[in-house]
Image (cartoon, rainbow, N blue to C red):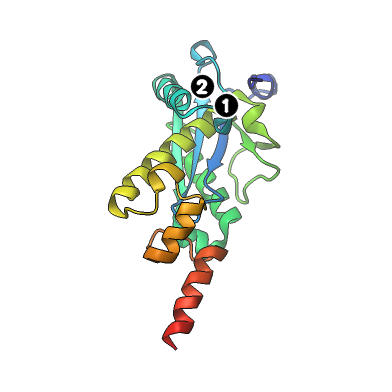
Amino acid sequence: MDQADDTFEQEALAAGAKRVAGVDEVGRGPLAGPVVAAAVVFDPARLPEGLADSKRLTAKRREALALALRETAELGIGMASVDEIDEINILRASHLAMLRAVAALPAPPEALLIDGNMIPEGCPHPARAIVKGDARSVSIAAASILAKSARDALMRDLAQQFPGYGWETNAGYPSKSHKAALQNLGVTPHHRKSFAPVHKILWQGKKASL
């Protein structure tokens, strides 16, 4: 497995930034739950080995790295709610979660490395967007791991309150069993009403009641 490296971080440090934060979000695709972002400033001398895009790690390895990062790095977690996703769209909500994660860092960063091809509107710090950054930058990879760990834990908690949708394993993504549960059990307050499969069920229910 190719591992992310610190090339982008070193470039930012060489340009004069003393605190460089990697930023990533998780949860654009699910039908339920918030979108969660993380921002990470790591200590180069205490960098956990094996940082890579969270999607390419086993759950066990991802959780071990998340624990190590919580002990060795500075981090901030931010999220945007289902209501915000439905109101402003998932892209803008993802960017809002990113800005909240950066704001939650213990001290302001001097440069940001952001996964993707866009810098969030209103970003208060110098920033660089890096396509597939979670596979290329160690701090963005770290952010992807922490965001996924935080979101998965949140969805496991919600699964206890709303059993039957399989959120403890599918994390709200549109698996076959999740979509079947939507049809059979209905829409919860944690479902994204602006997403087509959920909107369709709500519309069917509305037509049936006319």
Q: What is the three-letter code of the residue carrying label 2? A: Phe
Residue in view at x 62 percent, y 48 percent = 120
Quadrant placement of the C terminus: bottom left
Relative to 126, 168 lies left or right: left
Residue in view at x 45 percent, y 54 percent = 178
Image height of 28 relative to 9, above or below: below
- Mark 1, Cα crowd under 10 Å, few <14 / some 14-19 / many 20+, is many
In-front residue for pair 93/107: 93
Residue 209 image offset from top left, x and y in percent: 42, 85
Query: Disc 2 marks which residue?
Result: 42
| The quarter of the displayed image where residue 4 is located | top right
Q: Are marks 1 and 2 in contact (CB under 8 Å)?
A: yes
Residue 77 image offset from top left, x and y in percent: 44, 39
Query: Disc 1 marks which residue?
Result: 139
Residue 197 image offset from top left, x and y in percent: 54, 64
| The quarter of the displayed image where residue 126 is located | top right
Image height of 143 relative to 42, above or below: below
Can the viewer see residue 78 in this picture? yes
Quadrant placement of the N terminus: top right
In-front residue for pair 97/188: 188
